[in-house]
Image: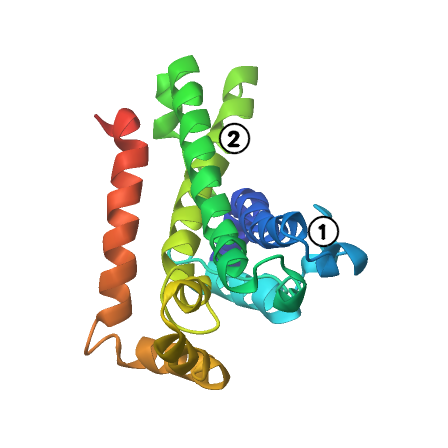
Amino acid sequence: MDALTNFLYTLSYVLIPLASAIVLHEYAHGWVANYFGDSTAKSLGRLTLNPLPHIDLVGSILVPLSLIFLFPGGFLFGWAKPVPIDPRKLYNPKRDMAFVAAAGPAMNLFLAMVSSALLYVFLVMDPTIQHNWPPQPGVQPRQDLLGMLLVPLAAMALFSVVINTLLFAFNLLPIPPLDGSRIMTSILPLRPALALARLEPYGMLIILGLFMVDPYVPIISTIIGTVFHVMTSTLLAPMIS
């Protein structure tokens, strides 16, 4: 029962930041592609802020819920259905694809910055709320109106910073099919770009393999952890100084 209670409490303030992060990430890809001439996402109804067309059963539901249940308050990750992009329709496929790929991580960076600013505003309004987040089962919630509003909002803003910085760092890894590899493919000379593109069918296996060996050779955790630490330390500095 305690595990289920913790799961439901965590879900209540993580669901909105996670859904916003992954949906807006994909929306940004589609919007920039449409701006540069590829209307594929728009014509298929994927250029929308409605989360339903973007939901992936595994990445948007099963994986995040499993992580919340197994590691409440710990590592959280998820993904949406990739927005369909047809590089052939872009005005300048090699150049424009870099902008399309970078749009997703750029959106996560923007969301992290906005969430950090909102969190700062909430703390200015009531500095004591940092002693009440995240809400914990069995702990008496604030009964005053300001506290009932600001505590969950502050918790969501804090988790939005965490989720978006993680997505930003992970998606910039130069491994297909992540956004970082598509940016690299666009800016590298033809021969190395083709060599990187040929890894696409094996990209998820490479990522899975790196995660499996990470406890022994911490490559991914070092890269993502470094970026995550620098970003969160910078974004949250006004709140912890």
Task: Estimate the x, y position of residue 1 in percent, counting from the top left.
Answer: 52, 58
**Taking the image as drawn, is residue 135 in sight?**
no
Which residue is pictured at 19% across the width and 77% down the height? 217
Residue 47, disc: 1
Residue neighbourhood size for the residue with mark 1, other residues' Cα within 10 Å, grouped as few (<14), some (14–19), many (≥20):
many
Amino acid residing under circle 2: Leu
Q: Nearer the viewer, residue 40 or 3?
A: 40
Q: Nearer the viewer, residue 207 or 153?
A: 207
Amino acid residing under circle 1: Leu
Residue 216 is drawn in which quadrant?
Answer: bottom left
Task: Note whether 145 is above or below 28 in the view shown.
Answer: above
In the visual, does 86 lie left or right of 13?
right
Task: Estimate the x, y position of residue 68 in percent, counting from the top left.
Answer: 48, 58
Residue 4 is drawn in which quadrant?
Answer: bottom right
Which residue is pictured at 43% across the width and 19% down the height? 121
Task: Note whether 183 is above or below 150 in the view shown.
Answer: below
Which residue is pictured at 56% across the width and 63% down the height? 93
- Going from N to C along the chain, the mark reached first, 2 or 1, is 1
Q: Quadrant of the C terminus?
A: top left
In the visual, does 1 lie left or right of 119?
right
Residue 112, disc: none
**Taking the image as drawn, is residue 11 in sight?**
yes
C-alpha separation, residue under disc 2 versus residue under disc 1:
28 Å
* Colouring rule applied to residues: rainbow
In the visual, does 170 lie left or right of 143?
left
Residue 153, disc: 2
Residue neighbourhood size for the residue with mark 2, other residues' Cα within 10 Å, grouped as few (<14), some (14–19), many (≥20):
some
Disc 1 secondary structure class = loop
Disc 2 secondary structure class = helix
Q: Residue furthest top?
A: 125
Task: Note whether 39 is above or below 203 in the view shown.
Answer: above
